[in-house]
Image (spheres, rainbow, N blue to C red):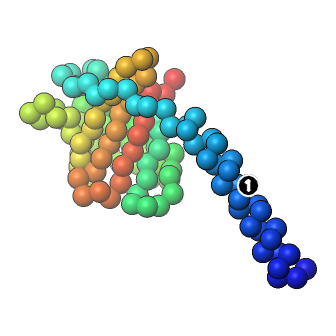
Amino acid sequence: MSPRVWVGRVGRALCAALLVALAVAPAGCAPLPPARQVTDISLIAGRWRGQIVFGRGPYDLFYLTINPDSTLVASWSGGTRWGKVTIEGGRTRFSFYIWSGNLDYLEGGGDRVLLLKEDFSQWDAIVRPLT
């Protein structure tokens, strides 16, 4: 196959993939519900599942369990971390052995979401209740 034919086929394939991605993207980007202040750990206690991303790397499946006693367990990519959730001055925070950050709770329209943002932007995670 000549280089010109190969480039033409690759170009058409990339163009088709881009069009599919553009058509699907808006449907997968549902708006997030509004933020809600956490006044008691029982509001966010439970099992959650979603995605975690380190820097600009790929997304990994992320599981989070928040216990009523404020302890938490997070697992992804074969690793597990144990930590604690605290409410400090109206802000909800999480801490693991080497990481800490803000935990934001969003709720509305039947949707519940937790956003975890590590303090030094090493990673972020988004989770919804595991049903």
Marks counted in the figure total 1
> Is residue 68 in sight in this rendering?
no
Residue farthest right in this picture: 1
Residue 95 x/y as whole percent: 23, 45
Which residue is at the front of the view, 43 or 21? 21
Residue 40 x/y as whole percent: 20, 22
Residue farthest top in this picture: 110
Residue 129 x/y as whole percent: 44, 27
**The N terminus is located in which quarter?**
bottom right
> Is residue 38 in sight in this rendering?
yes
- Residue receiving disc 1: 16
Instruction: Give the residue displayed 47% in from the left and 39% down from the top.
Output: 50
Q: Is residue 118 above or below residue 65?
A: below
Image quadrant of residue 110? top left
How dense is the environment of label 1, judged by Cα within 10 Å: few (below 14), some, or many (20 and up)? few
Element assignment for label 1:
helix
- Give amino acid for label 1: Ala
Instruction: Please state if 6 lies on the left or on the right of 42 as rendered.
Output: right
